[in-house]
Amino acid sequence: MDLRTYVGVLLRNWVLILLAIVLGLAAAGAVALFGTSRYTSTARILFSASQVDTGQDLAYAGNYVQSRMQTYKGLATTPAVLDKVIDELDLDTTPAELAKQISVETSQIDTLIGVTAESTDKREAARIADSVSTQLIGAVVGVENSGASDKEPGVRGVVVGRAVVAKSPSSPDVPVDLLAGLLLGAFVGVGAVTARHLLRDPESA
């Protein structure tokens, strides 16, 4: 079947394709309308070296902190941090369940960590992100500076961006869902028309 013939088949069956697109949009709209709205908020932490006197020590300590960022990222979703978050915010959950609501991002070029929390309550999402950030700083400082003298380089953390209460839900994303429904409907409609034509006229394949 050449391109001209194929286009002709699609044009003759435009009603079926349109129906599939409408059904796809309707399904996507239902998901967006009846789906549970979820909100996300992000707090940002800057980790750096502390108690450094010389440039050489600063470079060494800075490289050390950079090399530890993945460790700090992993520490953010451990019970050592989340148990304190649950107690502080009086959350009715477990560390394992709370960890599913949290994502942590690090960079290869700096020592910033982004802590993002998700919740069906937009204010709770911001509170969780802020609390995790605060507790993570305490856990990192406690681990890295334990046993160090006052004159030895250490690690410190500062919240450089507190979580902001979201103005709109992060999911469902209505425009994206509708676009997905439209594309899926078009794909199904074109596929159905093509399959029906080939079954009726196998020699045109």
Image (cartoon, rainbow, N blue to C red):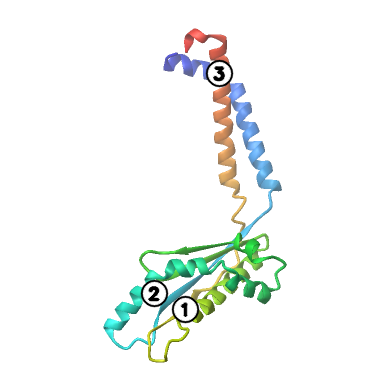
**Tag 1's secondary structure?**
strand
Quarter of the figure with residue 109: bottom left
In this view, the mark in front (3 or 1): 1
x then y, percent, for residue 198: 53, 14
Q: Secondary structure at mark 3?
A: helix
Provide residue 66's location: percent of width, then percent of height: 38, 71
Q: Residue at x 43, y 76 (%)?
A: 47
User: The residue tagged with tag 2: helix, strand or loop?
Assistant: helix
What percent of the width, then of the height, locates residue 177? 59, 44
Q: Amino acid at mark 3?
A: Ala
Q: Amino acid at mark 2?
A: Val
Q: Residues within 10 Å of mark 3 (few under 14, many from 20)?
A: few
Q: Quarter-wise, where is residue 162 in the image? A: bottom right
The residue at which mark 1 appears reads as 157
Per the image, the residue denoted by label 3 is: 195
Any mark on residue 65, and which? Answer: 2
Of callouts 2 and 1, the N-terminal one: 2
* Quarter assignment of residue 180: top right
Q: Residue furthest bottom?
A: 150
Mark positioned earlier in the residue sequence (2 or 3):
2
Distance between mark 2 and mark 1 Cα atoms: 11 Å
Which residue corresponds to the image point at 63% horizontal and 40% vertical from the top-left? 28
182 or 65: which is nearer to us? 65
Which of marks 1 and 3 precedes in the sequence? 1
Q: Which amino acid type is marked by label 1? A: Gly
Instruction: Decide if residue 28 is on the left or right side of residue 190.
Output: right
Cα distance between the residues tagged 3 and 1: 61 Å
Mark 2 vs mark 3, CA separation in Å = 59 Å
Q: Nearer the viewer, mark 2 or mark 3?
A: 2
Residue 52 sits above or below residue 160 on the image: below
Q: Nearer the viewer, residue 16 or 95?
A: 95
